[in-house]
Image (cartoon, rainbow, N blue to C red):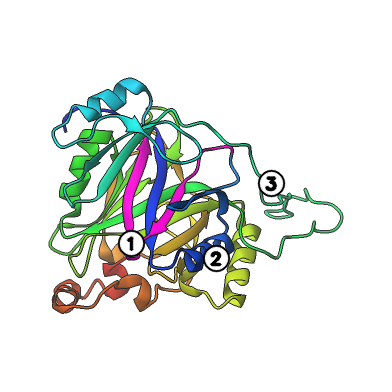
Amino acid sequence: MTEPLIKVKQLAYVRVRAPDKAVAEKFLTEFGLAVAERTDEAVYFRGTNPEPTCYVLSQGNGDVSAIAFEADNAEDLEKIAALDGASAIEPLDGPCGGQVVRLKDPMGMQVEICHGRSSLEALEAAPAHAFNMNGKRERVGLLPAIDRGPSHIRRIGHLVLESAQPETVYHWYHEHFGLTISDAVRLPDGSPQMVFSRLDRGDEYVDHHVVGFQFALDEAIRVQHIAFEVGNLDDLMSGHEYLKRRKRKNVWGIGRHLLGGQIFDYWKSPFGVIHEHWTDTDLVNEQHQAQDCGLGDMNDYWGPGPSPAFLIAKWNFKVIKNIFRLMTPTSNLTFCVYLN
């Protein structure tokens, strides 16, 4: 592969549109995001970590309108701004300031590369405690109280981009931003069902994936889900019960993924975008050897299978065609659309 133009340092934020901002904001606060600033045009959300805002909500048709990565330095912004079709370096909206360059990926998704945002003060994180497990007796006395409210989202972690050509889209992100393959899942014909990509930070350990490039059964283009790290297993479980009591739509979980290793829990928002809670991910660095897995090998460690609402965003003839194409003796619909 060619040497990337730049190597981004983290997933920064997403821009999401909803037909009713008040309804969307209520869901997001119940999900565990905190409002950092509210304007006439947008609501800016954050996690508990002392990091800039990670989610921008505005009025619209219920989709993810942009994804953003943070650059290492101002010189990287200049490199991106020099590309054909990229914007000039501009001031970034929101409470954390900074600068941004905007461009389109091969799917037409707006990608924003930012730098110079200011950090926020940390918020109270999820309560933590030791465990009496694996033969170790480290927690004495009574279990500390566990919050019975929303999960405590720490940060944005990853997202999944769906398209008809996930490998082509992955190569564009590698060449421009330095994302590199952690693992891939192959369809029976050898084409990719999912390319899990991570940040390339050399010997520094990073999350197993920051973007998953997924084959869409309906061959449409979208952000299939956005994933956020929560404090710990108790925090994830209490958030699950809190959302369930509020009649929110759980579409997959709770379980533990094979690739990535996360304990996961997926919820569909009132405006149709899937949001994930996760904790305890695999961490890898440049020493990690990428693996190709077949669909028949893709079985989570534990937990239920995904619901139809998770697997298929929109039914059309292409969905039916692809389901029949992918149904083989060694695969089934759950494996065909395995998403991490």
Asked if marks 2 and 3 touch (Cβ < 8 Å), the reply is no
Which quarter of the rendering shows the N terminus? top left
Question: Mark on residue 26?
Answer: 2
Left or right of residue 65: residue 107 = left
Left or right of residue 326: residue 257 = right
Residue positioned 42% across, 45% down in the render: 13
Residue positioned 73% across, 49% down in the render: 130
Q: Secondary structure at mark 3?
A: loop
Sequence order check, earlier mark of 3 and 1: 1
Q: Which quadrant of the structure image shows residue 123?
A: top right
- Quick one: label 2, few (<14), some, or many (20+) residues within 10 Å? few
**Label 2 to label 3: alpha-carbon separation:** 20 Å
Q: Which residue is mark 1?
A: 63
Amino acid under disc 3: Glu
**Label 2 to label 1: alpha-carbon separation:** 17 Å
Q: Is residue 270 magenta?
A: no
Left or right of residue 313: residue 270 = right
Which quarter of the rendering shows the C terminus? bottom left
Left or right of residue 150: residue 301 = left
Q: Which residue is mark 3?
A: 124
Quick check: can you spot residue 261? no
Amino acid under disc 1: Asp
Query: Residue 135 location in percent, x, y?
Result: 72, 53
Magenta residue span: 50-70
Q: Which callout, 2 or 3, points to the residue nearer the camera?
A: 2
Query: Residue 142 location in percent, x, y?
Result: 85, 58
